[in-house]
Image: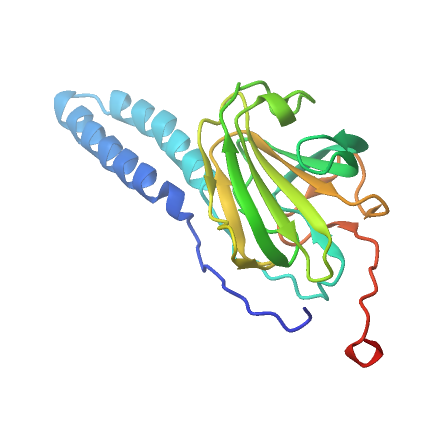
């Protein structure tokens, strides 16, 4: 899919944070005005402004959503679905869908990271499933199966299946998934959003080659985390 349709959402501040940011800002302004008018000294106003203004800027930083483009060939390439740090690179037995061994690469997002999620591969969304669960710390191994999570199965153009799992963490309490069953999906397109600290797992076919190392920082939609094994499809002339 070298020439792919790009359904891009040009978002500077993520839409998931618009209401939170506006309502919080209005509240801060209202309290600041009250403090300014209620005290002869500006000290309470200044203290409030420094503490809560900083907190609001951190919230603004959390909801930022940079516009990114992966400008290289996407065939058999897996890009990072999120900003964060690689916490797992290992073969695992996946018994929910595949019932075989898969290469699992996990990225942990701290509250300071961008929390928008991107599709890691081009393909077709086969299904989207949401599961309620616990809220263990997102970097723990048991978080992948026991925490609240959303599973998105993608079939690539050459027929390989990739599972993407959005996982809520100890702080995160809301997983948003934009992927829809039966729709085409593309690198550069938003898969969803997870509020606060969280994690994204990607399950790849065995034979996939990891392109990252443990502890490496990733940039969503830009960092290549793996290359999948090349599957040759028969030419129409040979059929």
Residue 16, relative to residue 145: is it above or below? Answer: below
Q: Position of residue 61 (x, y in %)?
A: 47, 40
Q: Residue 105: which quarter of the image? A: top right
179 versus 166 height, above or below: below
Percent position (x, y) of residue 69? 60, 62
Q: Is residue 115 visible?
A: no
Please determine whether, in this image, residue 179 is positioned above or below residue 31. below
The answer to whether residue 236 is visible is: yes
Along the viewing direction, whichever of 194 and 76 lies nearer the viewer = 76
Which residue is drawn at the image coordinates 24% and 25% (left, top)?
42
Work out whether 44 lies above or below 222.
above
Q: Residue furthest left?
A: 37
Q: In the image, is 218 to the left or to the right of 193? A: right
Q: Does residue 84 appear to the left or right of 193 in the view shown?
A: right
Residue found at the very far front of the displayed protein: 239
Q: How is the image coloured?
A: rainbow
* Residue 148, image x, y percentages: 52, 26
Along the line of sight, the residue nearer the viewer: 41 or 172: 172
Of the 4 image quadrants, the one containing the N terminus is bottom right
Which of the 4 image quarters holds residue 52? top left
């Amino acid at each position: 899919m070298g020439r792919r349709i790009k359904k891009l959402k040009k978002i500077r501040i993520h839409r998931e944070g618009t209401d939170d940011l506006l309502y919080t800002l209005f509240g801060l302004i209202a309290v600041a005005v009250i403090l300014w008018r209620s005290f002869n000294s500006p000290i309470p106003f200044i203290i409030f402004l420094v503490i809560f203004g900083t907190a609001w800027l951190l919230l603004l930083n959390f909801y930022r959503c940079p516009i990114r483009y992966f400008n290289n060939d996407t065939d058999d390439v897996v890009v990072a679905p999120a900003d964060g740090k690689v916490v797992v690179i290992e073969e695992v037995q996946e018994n929910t869908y595949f019932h075989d061994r898969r290469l699992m690469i996990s990225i942990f997002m701290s509250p300071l990271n961008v929390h928008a999620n991107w599709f890691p591969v081009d393909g077709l969304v086969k299904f989207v499933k949401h599961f309620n669960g616990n809220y263990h710390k997102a970097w723990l191994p048991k978080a992948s199966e026991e925490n609240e999570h959303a599973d998105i199965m993608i079939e690539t153009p050459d027929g390989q299946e990739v599972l993407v799992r959005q996982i809520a963490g100890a702080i995160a309490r809301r997983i948003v998934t934009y992927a829809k069953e039966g729709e085409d999906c593309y690198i550069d397109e938003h898969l969803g959003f997870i509020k606060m600290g969280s994690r994204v797992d990607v399950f790849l076919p065995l034979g996939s080659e990891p392109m990252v190392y443990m502890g490496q920082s990733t940039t969503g939609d830009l960092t290549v985390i793996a290359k999948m094994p090349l599957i040759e499809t028969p030419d129409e002339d040979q059929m």
